[in-house]
Amino acid sequence: MPPPRGITRPSPKTRGVRAPRLHVMVTAEVRSTGVKSSPSPRPTRASVLVIVMITLLFATFALLAFMEKAAVDLLVDQRVAVTKRLRTEAYSALEVVLGVLVDFREVGNGLRSPAEGWNDPLAFAGYAPSEGCVIEVTFEDESGKLSLPHINAQVMTNLFMQWGVLKNDADALADALLGWMKRGHVYTSPLQPNYEYGAIPYEPPGRPMRSYHELAAIDRVRDYFYDPDGRPNDAWRRFVDNVSLFDFAKPNLNAAKPDVLAALGQYDPMQTRNVTDYLRGQGNFQTNGPGIFQNNNDVANIAGPTGDAGGFATTIGALRINLTVREGRNEYRVSTVIAPPGGATTVQTTATKKETTTANSATQQQNQPNATQASAKPGGTTGAKDAAGRNLKYPFTLLEIRENDEIYQASATPTT
């Protein structure tokens, strides 16, 4: 077979010797004919590596997202478990505190002041919290304040004037407050509120306030107790410190604050300071320790003959117990207000018009027989349970319980 054009057959002498020209010519021939060489395997291996790396990257992101979500879920479960444990610890300590108060109440024929010896009830009972927990108990005598349901215009005006408010302005503030709380109140100030003509019309409830934040809804009053941004100011906090929302007949003289002594007892600054120093064991009474008034007549020995102590009592009608449990950085708070038998009560009057209440009462009276028959169970089981609940004879009435909430304790005294 003859060799291709352009290629000469090598001679026998040159056989076995590589001819560079032949290689170049063959290459040129192949290129000229358009025949491609087989692809190299290196690009395929690089593509596989890129795909694997992308897959690993997505898997890493997915794993990190799962770990983050799992960590959050575990943290929530941990916090729930810690909260339950501290809550149990708080209520266990609260029961111990109540037991100590019952003992002192029975021995002293009523509670008057922590100076009687129950200022550290857990230590008195020998109570030891769980390992790692620290419990702090503070008391605040709610009945040492003025009872808002029983306060009158004169006492309220005296209170505002004690804060430096002018007489006319103090009368106007007292008038606005009483108009909010008493149905059918006749205003004495020239500027009467018109709640029904406001941007959002509403009517006064005609019952004592149930929350201090109701002050924001009362005309003229809101301007005194709130700043221009609508936040409670120092006057609001002073009102909270001296006025109680609970219903009791007379404030406890053994916990009365200077403003209360001045507004209700009409004591001058020197008298109020002497009474306060006596109760706290300060000033001239520092060597005697905190004092206690057993009856109203005893205050004359400290404050002098002037002043009126007839509007005060000497026993506690409502006591706030603030209990805090700490475990490391975790904290749980419980605040409860208790009342002894015959003590304070909550505001029961509803903010409903009289005619509406009468109509609802008539409807309930008509439906009462059917409702009673429907709720009755064979064997009288419900009646037995209700009777057992009424015969529980718990030593105190729980007026309020708040957990992990904002607790106002401007005058609370630490006990541990």
Image (cartoon, rainbow, N blue to C red):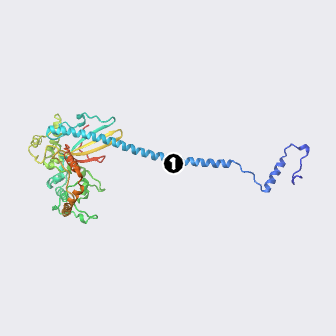
Locate residue 8 relative to residue 298 in the image: left or right: right
Residue type at mark 1? Ala
Q: In the structure shown, which secondary structural element does the residue marked by tag 1 occupy?
A: helix
Q: Which residue is mark 1?
A: 62
- Front one among 215 and 315: 315
Please say whether residue 281 is visible from this viewpoint: no
Residue at the limit of the structure toward the right, as seen here: 12
Q: Residue at x 72, y 51 (%)?
A: 39
Toward which corner of the image does residue 129 lie, by quadrant?
top left
Quadrant of res 328: top left
Is residue 231 visible to us here?
yes
Q: Is residue 326 above or below residue 222?
A: above
Disc 1 crowd rating (10 Å Cα; few below 14, some 14-19, many 20+) is few
Q: Is residue 191 left or right of residue 70?
A: left
Q: Position of residue 361 (x, y in %)?
A: 19, 61
Residue 208 at x, y percent in the picture: 20, 55
Q: Nearer the viewer, residue 58 or 381?
A: 381
Task: Point out residue 196 in the picture as x, y percentages from the top left corner.
Answer: 24, 65
Residue shown at 60% from the left, 47% from the top: 52
Q: Position of residue 185 (x, y in %)?
A: 16, 61
Viewer-proximal residue, 8 or 75?
A: 75
Residue at 89% x, 44% y: name it: 14
Compared to 292, does 354 lie above or below?
A: below
Of residues 413 and 346, the one nearer the viewer is 346
Farthest residue in the front direction? 379
Q: In the picture provided, is 78 more to the left or to the right than 381?
A: right
